[in-house]
């Protein structure tokens, strides 16, 4: 069973876990993902790859507490084991030399876009990186991105750090300045990927987005991850996860991602009220991201 | 029972009925429906066999089980020996005793079939396999001395498990690579608990592990390692038994609404992920009130019966042909009818209607009539113009078959497939267009049965053994 090497809280509801899966790490390429299962009763959750330590066979997952499984993950300490971690799944991100390439990361999407940024840079592109989060304390991977990017722009929704506003504002400004960008790659919450795609469409800049719909097997066997691209149904697990942002039906994606909200609530409530639950009471304030404002704090 | 009955006397013995869970009661649980024969019943049923010289049943079996041989051992009450007799040619008797279509294979050719009803060979097979397992009488077969040859089996469904069992007995080192976290393939993710308890599949896999088969679960060949990389890792021959793992959808409007599942997804959630036990298991599943299952095969029957057990008030089979053309086993259709499934024959959906949250609300159907036979020999369904009507549904399961999953063909240069993506093999050896690469089961035939897949695993194992011993120098 894969060993948890490290699991630390980065901020508020965002955690970073390192799992020892040398064979997966040896094969994984930028843009691919894994599916993990915490325990025997656990569900299969797809997770983006937020870093690959090939020397130590360690895979980094940056995750946000959004439900029972992610809450449960926060209770795993270094040295413990998870039931399974399968991968690498999906197709690697398309990488070529376009001249100038731009990666846009929002929220926890800042982590998985980092390996892609590295790959773009290695392919000889001039790299513009735009990362953004709600506030300064939620910002991830700033140093990592600074190492790789030729130009790094940081924004926060509340203006507590960097540019006050959205990643798309910064991108628009760059495009308005007439910078010729060969390719934009965006990873983040669905609304952010949609806004970026809508923007770049106006400027006719090709744009990839990495989709993270619900999945079960992750090998094309079940069709849970159906997305509509240019009016055609695709399976994100095997045809993606990267798709042409100008052609993705984001409405459908958003709706399909909410398919189990009711059950997710039940599972979370049951988990938090379990007397054996290792999470402190504060988390009882947990609410779903699309419910008002998220005030939850997790502490052990 | 008297020792020597005359054939005429045997014909008079009543055909035994398998006791089953009450239809109303069983739709409230996921426990197995048929209980299995009692020992007394098995002994009576065994007496019905005429032990006829032509043994047509053996020829009817895709893996040529010595059927009269094991039935005679039942008469001698040596049930464990009977189970071992079956296992000489079939590694999965407890599974096949439950899910094989015996009525089309061994039983249809039984001389008693027409007038008295065939000997219930499947029931007897199940009886001895269960008896052996439940009484801890399972013995490891003799395993040949190590040959030094290594075999990789890709996929742990019936084809892979059978090939693995045969090859390990011949002394080869065998590793099974399984993409999911549990071995068993369709036996685990596809066939529901009420038809094939998962503990039985686990016992079959444990048995192989005890013989020395290594299982590597959560390993997707084609993603983690390709076929060529497996050779580089030292495997001398490879068997591909990855099944028909790409669900077909109809491509009609609204098909991506929430509440429309492929049968693979619906059954995987319930069977492999145990979503029927939510929230004790984390995986959720939609519980529909009005559930339509599209298709007329065993998978459709498994899906619709699952829906009933998950609380459906109305569970429909919607099938575009008539009941005569339904490919499901009679027993499955019978069980579904007993449980209250409503059959809408000669009907097909043409579009789905959703609510503002994107959840399916209804489907518009059209009635069909049968025309001339098509390429499959079945009469072609033709839509009747103007017969459209709307059916209220909150869950739809599309069980209209699978295509082959392209993961391995795409990552294996030189592996030839037909236009449907099925791997092309020599039917006598199951050898593909690639040296030392064999394939069998649904990835070759398209969606078929457990026993045909097992039979293919068996043929491949025989050919692989020959190849390993004659052409691989160690």
Image (cartoon, helix red, strand yellow):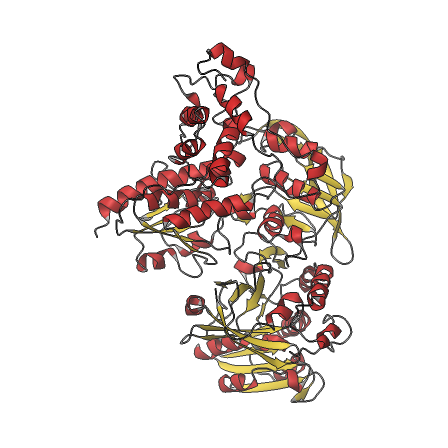
How far from the left and from the top, in percent, is residue B41? 55, 25
Tell me if I can see residue A123 in this picture: yes
Task: Residue at the far bottom: name it.
Answer: A161
How far from the left and from the top, in percent, is residue A219? 52, 56
Q: Nearer the viewer, residue B177 or B441?
A: B177
**Quadrant location of residue B64?**
top left
Q: Residue at x 50, y 53 (%)?
A: B182
**Quadrant location of residue A22?**
bottom left
- B74 relative to A125, above or below: above
Q: Residue at x 45, y 66 (%)?
A: A24
How far from the left and from the top, in percent, is residue A209? 59, 69
Q: Relative to A35, is A13 on the left or the right? A: right
Q: Residue at x 49, y 27 (%)?
A: B121
Task: Residue at the far left: name it.
Answer: B473
Q: Nearer the viewer, residue B165 or B179?
A: B165
Q: Nearer the viewer, residue B240 or B450?
A: B450
Q: Nearer the viewer, residue B151 or B91?
A: B91
Tell me if I can see residue B345 in this picture: no
- B408 relative to B92, above or below: below
- A128 relative to B39, above or below: below
How far from the left and from the top, in percent, is residue B236? 29, 52
């Amino acid at each position: 069973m894969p060993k948890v090497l490290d699991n630390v809280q980065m901020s508020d509801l965002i955690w970073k876990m390192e799992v020892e899966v040398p064979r997966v790490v040896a094969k994984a390429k930028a843009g691919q993902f894994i599916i993990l299962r915490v325990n025997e009763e656990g569900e299969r959750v797809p997770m983006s790859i937020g870093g690959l330590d090939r020397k130590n066979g360690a895979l980094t997952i940056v995750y946000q507490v959004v439900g029972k499984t992610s809450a449960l993950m926060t209770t795993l300490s270094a040295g413990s084991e998870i039931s399974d971690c399968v991968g690498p799944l999906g197709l690697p991100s398309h990488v070529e030399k376009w001249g100038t390439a731009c990666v846009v990361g929002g929220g926890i999407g800042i982590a998985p876009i980092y390996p892609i940024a590295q790959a773009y840079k290695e392919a000889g592109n001039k790299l513009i990186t735009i990362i953004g989060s709600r506030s300064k304390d939620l910002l991830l991977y700033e140093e990592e991105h600074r190492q790789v990017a030729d130009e790094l722009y940081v924004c926060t929704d509340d203006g507590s750090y960097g540019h006050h506003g959205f990643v798309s504002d910064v991108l628009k400004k760059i495009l308005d300045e007439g910078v010729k960008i060969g390719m934009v790659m965006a990873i983040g919450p669905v609304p952010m990927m949609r806004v970026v795609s809508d923007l770049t469409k106006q400027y006719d800049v090709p744009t990839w987005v990495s989709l993270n719909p619900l999945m079960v097997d992750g090998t094309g066997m079940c069709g849970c991850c159906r997305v509509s691209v240019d009016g055609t149904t695709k399976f994100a697990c095997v045809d993606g996860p990267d798709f042409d942002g100008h052609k993705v039906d984001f409405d459908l994606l958003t709706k399909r991602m909410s398919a189990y909200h009711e059950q997710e609530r039940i599972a979370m409530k049951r988990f938090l009220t379990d007397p054996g639950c290792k999470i402190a009471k504060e988390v009882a304030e947990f609410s779903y991201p699309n419910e008002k404002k998220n005030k939850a704090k997790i502490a052990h | 029972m008297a020792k020597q009955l005359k054939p005429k006397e045997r014909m008079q013995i009543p055909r035994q009925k398998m006791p089953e869970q009450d239809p109303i009661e069983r739709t409230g649980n996921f426990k197995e429906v048929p209980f299995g024969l009692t020992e007394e019943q098995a002994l009576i049923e065994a007496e019905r066999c005429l032990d006829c010289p032509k043994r047509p049943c053996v020829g009817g079996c895709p893996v040529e089980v010595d059927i009269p041989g094991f039935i005679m051992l039942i008469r001698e009450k040596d049930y464990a020996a009977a189970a071992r007799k079956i296992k000489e040619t079939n590694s999965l008797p407890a599974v096949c005793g439950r899910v094989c279509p015996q009525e089309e294979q061994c039983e249809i050719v039984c001389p008693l079939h027409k007038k008295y009803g065939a000997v219930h060979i499947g029931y007897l097979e199940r009886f001895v396999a269960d008896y052996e397992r439940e009484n801890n009488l399972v013995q490891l077969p003799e395993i040949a001395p190590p040959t030094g040859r290594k075999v990789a089996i890709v996929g742990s469904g019936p084809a892979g498990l059978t090939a693995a069992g045969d090859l390990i007995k011949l002394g080869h080192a065998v590793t099974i690579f399984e993409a999911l976290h549990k071995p068993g393939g369709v036996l685990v993710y596809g066939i529901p608990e009420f038809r094939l308890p998962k503990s039985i599949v686990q016992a079959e896999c444990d048995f192989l592990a005890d013989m020395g088969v290594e299982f590597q679960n959560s390993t997707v060949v084609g993603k983690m390692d390709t076929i060529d990389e497996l050779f580089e890792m030292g495997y001398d021959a490879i068997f591909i038994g990855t099944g028909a793992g790409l669900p077909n959808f109809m491509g009609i409007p609204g098909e991506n609404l929430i509440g429309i599942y492929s049968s693979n997804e619906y059954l995987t959630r319930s069977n492999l992920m145990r979503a029927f036990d939510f929230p004790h298991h984390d995986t959720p599943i939609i519980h529909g009130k009005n559930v339509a299952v599209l298709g007329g095969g065993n998978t459709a029957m498994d899906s619709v019966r699952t829906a009933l057990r998950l609380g459906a008030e109305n569970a429909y089979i919607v099938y575009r042909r008539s009941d005569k053309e339904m490919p499901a086993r009679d027993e499955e259709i019978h069980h579904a009818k007993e449980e209250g499934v409503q059959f809408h024959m000669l009907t097909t959906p043409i579009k789905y209607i959703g609510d503002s949250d994107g959840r399916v609300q209804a489907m518009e159907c059209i009635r069909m009539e049968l025309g001339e036979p098509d390429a499959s020999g079945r009469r072609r369904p033709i839509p009747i113009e103007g017969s459209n009507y709307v059916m209220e549904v909150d869950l739809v399961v599309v069980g209209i078959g699978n295509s082959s999953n392209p993961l391995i063909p795409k990552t294996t240069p030189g592996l030839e497939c037909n236009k449907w993506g099925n791997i092309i093999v020599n039917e006598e050896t199951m050898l593909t267009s690639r040296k030392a690469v064999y394939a069998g089961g649904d990835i070759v035939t398209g969606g078929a049965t457990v026993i045909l897949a097992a039979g293919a695993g068996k043929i491949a194992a025989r050919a692989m053994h020959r190849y390993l011993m004659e052409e691989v120098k160690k």
